[in-house]
Amino acid sequence: MPFRDLHRDAVVADTHNDLLMAVSARPPRQWASFFRRQWLPQLVEGGVDVQVLPVFIDDEFRPEGALRQTLRMIECAHVIAEGNPESVRLCLDGDQIDEALALGRIALVLAMESMPGIDASVELIPTMHRLGVRVASIAHWRRTPLADGSGEDATGSRLTDAGVEAVGEMERLGMIFDVSHLGASGVEHVLEIATRPVMATHSSARALRDHHRNLTDAQLRGVAATGGVICVNFLAAFLLEDARSATVDHLVDHIEHIAGVAGIDHVGLGPDFVREVYADLTPPWCCEEAGFSGLDTGAAIPGLDGPRGMPLVTEGLLKRGFSEDEIVKILGGNVMRLFRSELGRGR
C-alpha cells in the first residue's frame, strides 16, 4: 500500500506537542480562532487523529504563578475544543476517543509536564483530573518536590515521599504516569512501584544517542514490562549528536531499536514539535533555555519540524521493511490500546 494511503487509514497518535504554549500566549478571545488558523491545518495535513496536549509551565511563571498558568492553559484547551466542535473533541477516556474518531474529529487529551502548579500538594491531583488531565509527569529538567528531572541524574535521587504518593494517586484515578524527563533513578523507582502501565510520552533510545533525556535499554524493557508504551522523540538533538545531520532514517533507527528491545507492541510517536513554539514565543536575543545547554535546539529533521511532516515517518518505516501491521501499531495502535485500557479508568 502507498505510504500516504497507509498513513491516512491508520490512527495516528502524537503524544507530545507543546502547541498549548503558543495558543495560550494569545488573548483568550483568540484561543479558538488561532488554533483553528495556525494548528488545525497542520494536524489535518499530517493525519494526526489523537493529539496529547501537555501543559508546560515556563520558568517565568515559577513558582508564584505556576498554578495560575496551569489553570490558564487547561482552560485554553477547553476553549479550543468548545470553539472548534466540528474539528476536535477533548476526551477523557478511550471510549470518548473512539467516538471522536468515528465522527471524524481529532481527539485531544490533556497532559501535565511536571507539576509545578501542584508541587507537593498531591491532594490537588484529583482536581487536575476533574479538569480533564489524563497523563502527567512529575519532573522536567531540574529538581521538584516530587522527584529530580533527568538534568539532575548525578544526584542519584529517587522519588520523594510525595512523589510516591503522586504515583499511587494517579493510578487510583486512571491518570497515566509519564516517565519522560524523569531522572534515571526516579525512572527505576517508578518501575519498582508501578502497578499499572506507564508511558514515556517523548523519549528516544540512549543506546543510540547518549543523552540523559533518552531511556536506556533496561528502562525501555521496564516500561514495556508494565504494559506501557515508549513514544519516540523527534527532536534532532536527542537522535544524533550532530543534530544538523539528523534525517528520517535516524528517527527510524530509534524506532527500530526501541521495537527490538521493548517489543513492537510498546513503541509509539512523541514528536515534541517545539520549533514553531520557540520561534513564536522566544525573542531571538534570548539565551538558550535552561537545561538545553549544549544542545542544538534549532535543528529539526528536514520536513519534520511540525505535524505536516508526519507521513514521512510512515514512508521511512515502510522503506526500512516494517510490515503494514507493525506500522499501524507504531503510528498509534499501541497508544490507543493503552488509552482504551487505562485512560480515565480509575480503581
Image (cartoon, helix red, strand yellow):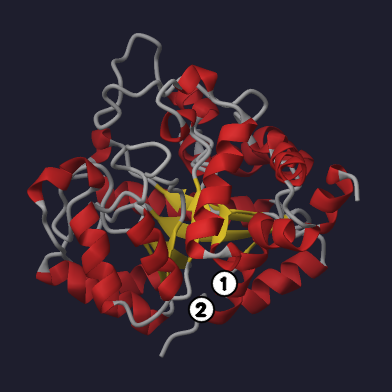
Q: Classify mark 2: helix, strand or loop.
A: helix
Q: Residue at x 30, y 20 (%)?
A: 288
| Residue 127 at x, y percent in the picture | 34, 71
Q: Is residue 316 visible?
A: yes
Three-letter code, disc 1: Phe
Residue 8: image tag: none
Q: Is residue 250 left or right of residue 307?
A: left
Task: Give the quadrant of residue 263.
Answer: bottom right
User: Which residue matches tag 1?
Assistant: 339
Which residue is at the front of the view, 243 or 303? Answer: 243
Q: Residue at x 91, y 51 (%)?
A: 1
Three-letter code, disc 2: Glu
User: Which residue matches tag 2?
Assistant: 342
Which residue is at the front of the view, 335 or 206? Answer: 206
Which residue is at the front of the view, 313 or 105? Answer: 313
Q: For the C terminus, which image quadrant?
A: bottom left
| Residue 26 at x, y percent in the picture | 50, 33
Q: Classify mark 1: helix, strand or loop.
A: helix
Q: Is residue 286 above or below residue 146?
A: above
